[in-house]
Amino acid sequence: MAIVRVENVSKHYRLGDQDVKALTNVSLAIEPGVFLAIAGPSGSGKSTLLNIIGCIDTPTSGRVIIDGHDVSGRTPDQLADVRARTIGFIFQTFNLLPVLSAAENVEYPLLQLKELSKAERQERVKHYLEVVGLSKYASHRPNQLSGGQRQRVAIARALATHSKIVLADEPTANLDSKTGTSILKLMQRINRESGTTFVFSTHDRKVMNMADRLVRIADGEITALGMRSDDQWMFVQDQRPKGEVEPEV
């Protein structure tokens, strides 16, 4: 069963006196455990789709089902609870709190989970800092860490809530090529070892190359759905302009 279902979702909003159509009748099923890239140019709607999947934004029409629960029409507080317990986020700007240490940043979302004791929170923090290789940097604040280390803290924070889905919005955009590749390999390893579902929005070919599922989006509509098989892309839906180049493998 799909962990995420997006059914006929449209998103329109006003920009001055214009009605902007960010998404139009988008339908998508995301299976558990995939490493999926939503790819498209700036303004294509990929970040809007990611925000709707992440319950940060709500569709104008259509349904969104997360882990078997229809979140359409939920109140902001109800959506916040879904985010806290089901979805982890990784942002291109890291979004770490500068006054907190790496450990405190990882612990911060756990404070919303009232069923966890302080000892349980600290055990999770210790474990996930180990997972991302930052145990000895637990007391460092963000300004004492490199860009790659900050993104590793963000990954640990996303995993610490035991999220079933991790959404990453252009996670390598503010990193150099070598650091970005190491971060992608880390997330891929976590995906394969833990089965956590990863969904990226990206226009970075490196991210597309490492994905096992690919969603191409343009002008608010899905133009191609592909899956990798034996290092080849197989497209079950393909409405791209002729001549568009496939991701390299």
Image (cartoon, rainbow, N blue to C red):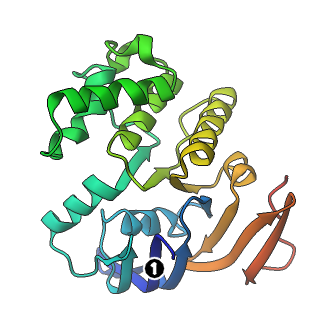
- Quarter where residue 67 is shown: bottom left
**Count of number-bearing discs:** 1
Residue drawn at the location 28% of the way across and 19% of the way down: 101
Percent of width and height locating residue 27: 52, 83
Residue drawn at the location 22% of the way across and 66% of the way down: 79
Front one among 158 and 245 = 158
Q: Is residue 180 left or right of residue 136?
A: right
The amino acid sitting under disc 1 is Val
Front one among 202 and 182 = 182
Q: 10 Å neighbourhood of mark 1: few (<14), some, or many (≥20)?
A: many
Residue drawn at the location 37% of the way across and 69% of the way down: 52
160 relative to 49, above or below:
above
Q: Is residue 68 left or right of residue 84?
A: right
- The answer to whether residue 193 shows anywhere in this view is yes
Q: Is residue 220 left or right of residue 76?
A: right
- Quarter where residue 50 is shown: bottom left
Percent of width and height locating residue 59: 33, 79
Identify the secondary structure beneath mark 1.
strand
Front one among 90 and 111 = 111
Front one among 7 and 128 = 128
- Quarter where residue 237 is shown: bottom right
3 relative to 61, above or below:
above
137 relative to 172, above or below:
above
Q: On the image, numbered disc 1 is attached to which residue?
A: 6
Percent of width and height locating residue 223: 67, 79
156 relative to 87, above or below:
above
Percent of width and height locating residue 195: 55, 52
- The answer to whether residue 147 shows anywhere in this view is no
